[in-house]
Amino acid sequence: MGSKSMEIKSEDIFIKTTGETDVIDITSKVKRFVVESGISNGIAVLFVPGSTAALTTIEFESGAVNDLKRAIEGMAPRDIYYEHNERWGDGNGYAHVRAAILGPSLHIPLTDGKLTLGTWQQIVLLDFDNQPRQRQVIIQLMGE
């Protein structure tokens, strides 16, 4: 029996954000890369460089997205004191804390050439910074 060899394929996607706690569905971009890669079984790793953005999954509908934004505001409100703002003067201390709580990466299994996501589960980029950015999301697929 022949065995398939492990492959690693990478792609970067770029997303423009507004600086207002954007929650952006990137699922279709990731799915497209999975299909194009030809990798059937393995894992997808997604990573956003930077300390004021994060990745997670959610049912991407307005109610759930608004609930998430409200919960994030409750955990790390914009309008409280952040020492970071004293040091750097950029007013985005809340963005660093929010990103640290949610984290910069995701790992999603690949099975039969598809992301193993739940029926109502989408991949989202969250940008917490207080100014527009061009965000990079690195997608790396490993498998056979």
Image (tube, grey):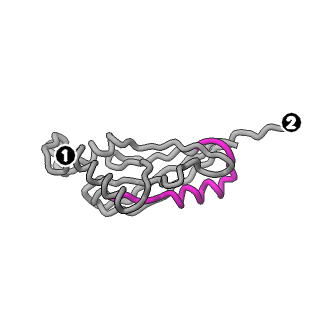
Badge 2 amino acid: Met
From the image, tell me which residue sits under label 2: 1
The residue that appears at 54% across and 49% down in the rendered structure is: 117
- Mark 2, residues whose alpha carbon is within 10 Å: few (<14), some, or many (≥20)? few
Image-quadrant location for residue 42 = top right
The residue that appears at 77% across and 40% down in the rendered structure is: 4
Q: Which mark is residue 88?
A: 1
Is residue 30 inside the magenta stretch? yes
Q: Position of residue 13 (x, y in %)?
A: 49, 57
Between residues 73 and 52, which one lies in front from this camera angle? 73
Q: Quadrant of the N terminus?
A: top right
Q: Secondary structure at mark 1?
A: helix
Badge 1 amino acid: Trp
Image-quadrant location for residue 21 = bottom left
Q: Position of residue 79 (x, y in %)?
A: 14, 50
Q: Earlier in the sequence, mark 2 or mark 1?
A: 2
What count of labels does the image hold? 2
- Mark 1, residues whose alpha carbon is within 10 Å: few (<14), some, or many (≥20)? few
Q: Which mark is residue 108?
A: none
User: Which segment did they paint magenta?
Assistant: 22-43
